[in-house]
Amino acid sequence: MSLLSGKKILVGISAGIAAYKTPILVRLLVKAGAEVKVVMTPSAKDFVTPLTLSTVSKNEVFSTFTKEENENAIWNNHVELALWADFFIIAPATTNTLSKMANGICDNLLLATYLSAKCPVYYAPAMDLDMYKHLATQVTFNKLASFQTIQIPAGYGELASGLVGEGRMAEPEEIVAFVEKDVLKNLPLRNKKVLITAGPTYEAIDPVRFIGNHSSGKMGFEIAQVAANLGAEVILISGPTHLTTSNNQIKYISVTSAQQMYDVCHEYFNAMDIAILSAAVADYRPKNAATQKIKKATATLHIDLEPTKDILASLGVIKKNQILVGFALETENEIENAKNKLKKKNLNLIVLNSLNDKGAGFKSETNKVTIIDQKGGLKEFDLKTKTEVAKDLLNEIILLIHE
Ligand code: CTP
């Protein structure tokens, strides 16, 4: 999954020959998980059809201030369109459109939308090399830079005129990669490595039976997803679960037992900036797992259990500058017990789930948590979806980073 997943992207097309590549650009953005709308200048329609763009974007395409429907003129609201967008990518951006943007001219819907945009605006220039090099164009570029309008550099190559030089619109793949990289640059967890544990662990009794628990892994997977969306490089270590992840910022490592989870956590922890341990690790495991399936030969069966290693506590012992976060599930003296656990395991934050709260816990889609810090500071959150809980937790971690 891309950082652009779930984002609303407005693609602005002006009248350059490179407009023929824009259906591919739209397609790539849709494939990255973005919702895409297109606004084009009236002349851009000579190079690419609105029908093509509408088909690939799965949305209506806008090019005029009004549309005629049942003999009534309906206003295409440029302000609404601009405010809808998380990102505005103008590609191809011709000299004509760019110089109008730089001078606040507003004689078509694309330009009106540009002037109304509050989101980051990117443009991919496309023009012949002499136009590209002309001082007027360079002045335009500088002016646009002073408006924080971001240039996606033009490429070098053969141009429509037959000349070879600078001015070719960046390829659609390059445009998407540029925007993704730029988005990442501004994210609060960029360059941060985050280790997350999730799910249950299974402790073998014999080759076919195990001791496990009902943890779905959902909380940990949501934390991983949100952390990746905030720019982090994530290592997600999970016990058995039906959940999957396909985010290229998340390295997924599947484990079965507490010992395997312990080993993988220790392999990666030193290189981490943050570790969030949300897994429901088994506290005990069979002392001697049978190598053959246990037969029902006796009236009763005793299995000796021994404690597993406490992964969280062991990381608390070796931690240097990492922010270490644990979870606690308590049924009585919740705050007191959670605070003790935070101290005992040398944590920076502890997330308290209370079993007394309806809708919180293992299999539910929601959770209700209280986050406690080392100074005893306590934040109680409402019942929320696990995605929202993950966002709250990562916000608290970001605040800690900036403390
Ligand atoms: N944890 C862990 N390794 C274990 C057991 C727990 O890393 N072997 C982590 C969990 O991922 C979670 C926290 O410790 O972050 C939860 O611990 P919890 O089970 O609530 O408490 P315990 O430390 O096991 O103590 P108790 O059972 O007495 O409450």
Image (cartoon, rainbow, N blue to C red):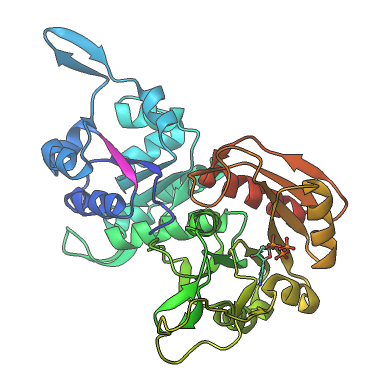
> In the image, what residue occupies the spot 21% across and 31% down?
60
Specify start and end residues of the magenta stretch as a single range.
Answer: 34-40
Above or below, 256 relative to 343: below
- Name the chief secondary structure element in magenta: strand
Residue 272, position in %: x, y? 65, 73
Above or below, 21 relative to 277: above
Is 79 on the left-hand or right-hand side of 53?
right
Is 342 on the left-hand or right-hand side of 112?
right
Is 259 on the left-hand or right-hand side of 344?
left
Residue 304 visible to the viewer: yes
> In the image, what residue occupies the spot 12% across and 7% down?
71
Is residue 36 in the magenta section? yes
Residue 89, position in %: x, y? 37, 45
> In the image, what residue occupies the spot 79% across and 68% down?
345
Is residue 85 in the magenta section? no
Above or below, 204 relative to 366: below
Give the camera-side residue of 263 and 205: 205
- Which quadrant holds residue 287? bottom right
Q: Residue furthest bottom?
A: 291
- Which quadrant holds residue 367? top right
> In the image, what residue occupies the spot 33% across and 50% down?
33
Residue 168 visible to the viewer: no
Residue 115, position in %: x, y? 44, 29
- Which quadrant holds residue 303? bottom right
